[in-house]
């Protein structure tokens, strides 16, 4: 009997070559599986299916894990206002984990002998895929032709053409990874540390001028309504905010960070929905959470984002962090109002029943109602005591 191999199939050059090579040269029974986390259109998925069979796949499947991706990752990234290095919404790395989970489950389901993916040896994705497969499908062989054979694009393109598969895999100036939580942009000027990306590099162009308000309502930290329209489907809410923000070119930036393998990486991105949602959510939390809730959320959320990026989603502590983030959202209710304009946005205000700025104890900078003037003077004197003690004993220290 032929050995079964599941190929994590995106429809790109590397995975297309992998399907054909394993079917023709190695005699595998190839199962091409496209794990969709929200970045593929219906047309793309249909084309993937057609191409997979042309390449020699025995079977093609689309595994839709968009809802799982939201419920088990994006939701917590919003709760934690997660931005890697304070900049990047961890778009690609979080997607890859859930694609790998889906592929591993499918491989186990069909009793596959091997799993193949198209990662190179110079990036993070090889680690995210391999680690997930090693944990969840420990008895399945991992095949990575692009990495192990050090394949060039020209070699792969020529091989496909020689075996009758014609597709436009001409190397473009930029490569894109389009997903629900943003689009990453690699290549071109990004390879030069001194340059930024031109307008033409972005897939979504600035279409609107002037400004408008965007109202995002949250219930227990999750997006509930957009400009008054209620969304039970949180994926649809994200897509709606993306549509509104992308028309202004909001969410563009450049991220520089440390890769898992130790080298520095640079990537451009456009992510209107993540930046608007996180901006609105963080703003609402300033009104509704205590000082120490915000502080400790920031600490654990930073670790959550780092672990997601570095292929540690399966580490048990991630479930503990998620529990803390979930609990912290019980009073994050209300509407954050943003002002949108080309290439930027600003926060305007909030409407919330849980607004801690509204209090009977006083109005900042105006009038105290929960204490007297004498109370204030006594509090300040006691607060200053440790400093008065120190400087009384160290009069020689200059400030």
Image: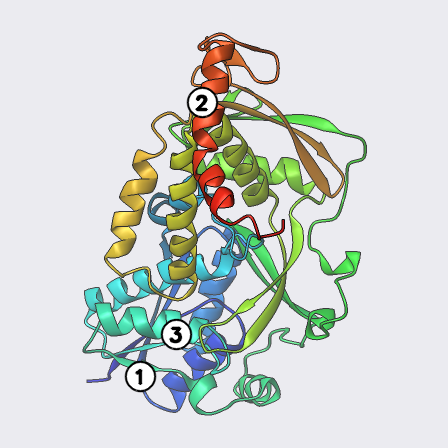
Cα distance between the residues tagged 1 and 3: 24 Å
Q: How many marks?
A: 3
Q: From the viewer's perspective, is the residue at label 1 or at label 2 nearer?
A: 2
The image quadrant that residue 176 belongs to is: bottom right
Considering only vertical position in the picture, is 67 above or below 155? above
Which colour assignment does the render follow? Answer: rainbow
Question: Residue 222 location, x and y as percent?
Answer: 42, 32
Can residue 266 be seen by looking at this rendering? Answer: yes
Residue at (76, 29) in percent of width and height: 211
Residue at (32, 88) in percent of width and height: 27
Considering only vertical position in the picture, is 202 above or below 117? above
Cα distance between the residues tagged 3 and 2: 55 Å
Residue at (64, 73) in percent of width and height: 168
Q: From the viewer's perspective, is the residue at label 3 or at label 2 nearer?
A: 2
Within 10 Å of disc 2 (Cα), the crowding (few <14, some 14-19, many 20+) is few
What residue would you read off at disc 1?
28
**Which label number is shown at residue 44?**
none
The image quadrant that residue 332 belongs to is: top left
Can residue 352 be seen by looking at this rendering? Answer: no
Considering only vertical position in the picture, is 167 above or below 369? below
Secondary-structure class at tag 3: helix
What residue would you read off at disc 2?
379
Q: Earlier in the sequence, mark 3 or mark 2?
A: 3
Within 10 Å of disc 1 (Cα), the crowding (few <14, some 14-19, many 20+) is many
């Amino acid at each position: 009997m032929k050995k079964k191999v599941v190929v994590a199939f995106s429809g790109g050059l590397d995975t297309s070559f992998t399907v054909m090579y394993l079917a023709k040269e190695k005699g595998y029974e190839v199962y091409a599986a496209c794990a969709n986390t929200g970045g593929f259109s219906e047309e793309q998925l249909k084309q993937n299916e057609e191409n997979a069979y042309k390449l020699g796949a025995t079977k093609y499947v689309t595994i839709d894990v968009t809802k799982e991706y939201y419920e088990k990752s994006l939701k917590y990234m919003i709760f934690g206002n997660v931005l890697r290095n304070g900049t990047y919404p961890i778009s690609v790395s979080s997607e890859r984990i859930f694609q790998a989970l889906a592929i591993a489950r499918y491989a186990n389901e069909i009793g596959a002998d091997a799993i193949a993916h198209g990662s190179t040896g110079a990036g993070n994705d090889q680690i995210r895929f391999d680690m997930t497969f090693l944990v969840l499908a420990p008895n399945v062989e991992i095949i990575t032709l692009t990495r192990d054979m050090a394949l060039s694009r020209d070699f792969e393109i020529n091989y496909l053409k020689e075996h009758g598969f014609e597709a436009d895999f001409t190397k473009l100036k930029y490569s894109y990874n389009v997903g629900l939580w943003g689009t990453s942009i690699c290549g071109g000027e990004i390879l030069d540390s001194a340059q930024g990306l031109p307008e033409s590099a972005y897939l979504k162009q600035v279409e609107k001028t002037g400004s408008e308000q965007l109202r995002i309502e949250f219930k227990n930290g999750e997006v509930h309504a957009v400009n008054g329209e209620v969304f039970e489907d949180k994926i649809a809410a994200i897509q709606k905010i993306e549509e509104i923000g992308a028309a202004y070119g909001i969410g563009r930036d450049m991220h520089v960070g440390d890769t898992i393998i130790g080298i520095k990486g640079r990537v451009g991105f456009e992510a209107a929905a993540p930046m608007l949602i996180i901006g609105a959510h963080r703003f609402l939390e300033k009104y509704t959470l205590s000082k120490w809730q915000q502080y400790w959320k920031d600490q654990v959320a930073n670790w959550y984002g780092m672990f997601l990026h570095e292929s540690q989603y399966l580490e048990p502590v991630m479930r503990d962090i998620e529990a803390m983030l979930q609990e912290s959202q019980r009073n994050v209710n209300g509407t954050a109002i943003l002002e949108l304009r080309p290439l930027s946005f600003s926060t305007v205000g909030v409407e919330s029943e849980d607004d801690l700025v509204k209090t009977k104890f006083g109005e900042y900078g105006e009038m105290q109602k929960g204490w007297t003037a004498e109370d204030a003077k006594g509090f300040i004197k006691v607060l200053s005591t440790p400093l008065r003690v120190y400087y009384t004993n160290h009069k020689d220290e200059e400030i």
